[in-house]
Image (tube, helix red, strand yellow):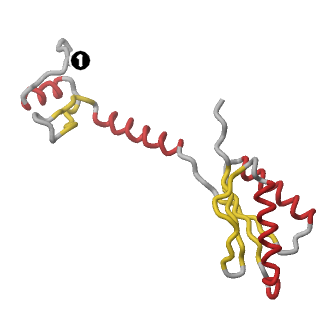
Amino acid sequence: MGDNIENPGIFSLRDALDLADKLDLDLVEISPNAEPPVCKVIDYQKFLYQQKKKQKEMQSKTLKMVIKEIRFGPNTDEHDYNFKLKHAEKFLEEGNKVKAYVFFKGRSILYKEQGEILLLKLAQDLEEFGKIDQLPKLEGKKMQIIISPKPAKKK
């Protein structure tokens, strides 16, 4: 290995192939559209391994958003509301979205206003943990609200 391969230069294709063969490495074309084309003498298997490793690392850094659902009735009492509120707080602290909905069965659809008040109260109680993505919206027999977690503060 007396040749100085750290110093880039312009080689003919034959010289580059000979150098790669002599070093028991591969000649890989990096930029085929350049004039002249840019090639690199590297261990191709090691290069592929490092590419896969970088890709896995990038995937692991991405956040996987999970939506947790909480169901209420239009006449949910205070104790049940507080119990579900604590669960919603925990979900938001873990970084999950919360989809809270009021399900109207039969004639309980007459209490739409109560359902909306309940969801707005929930949003107000969770204000310090998350922000509202979607205001209460009635879809069929469900009125739902979506709350996402506030971004974590960097120290």
Q: Residue at x 67, y 81 (%)?
A: 140
Residue 34 place in picture, x, y as percent:
15, 37
Judging by the rendered image, the residue that carries numbered circle 1 is 6
Specify the farthest residue to the bottom: 107
Q: Residue 10 is drawn in which quadrant? A: top left
Residue 153 lies, with reference to residue 101, above or below; the image says above
Residue 20 place in picture, x, y as percent:
17, 27
Along the viewing direction, whichever of 122 and 93 lies nearer the viewer: 122
Left or right relative to 141: residue 6: left
Image quarter (top left, top right, bottom left or bottom right) of the N terminus: top left
Look at the numbered disc 1 and give the secondary structure of its residue: loop
Left or right relative to 25: residue 65: right
Residue 59 lies, with reference to residue 87, above or below; the image says above
Q: Residue 142 is drawn in which quadrant? A: bottom right
Q: Residue at x 79, y 60 (%)?
A: 122
Residue 89 place in picture, x, y as percent:
78, 52
Residue 64 lies, with reference to residue 103, above or below; the image says above
Left or right relative to 6: residue 9: left
Residue 63 place in picture, x, y as percent:
57, 47
Q: Residue at x 89, y 64 (%)?
A: 80
Image quarter (top left, top right, bottom left or bottom right) of the C terminus: top right
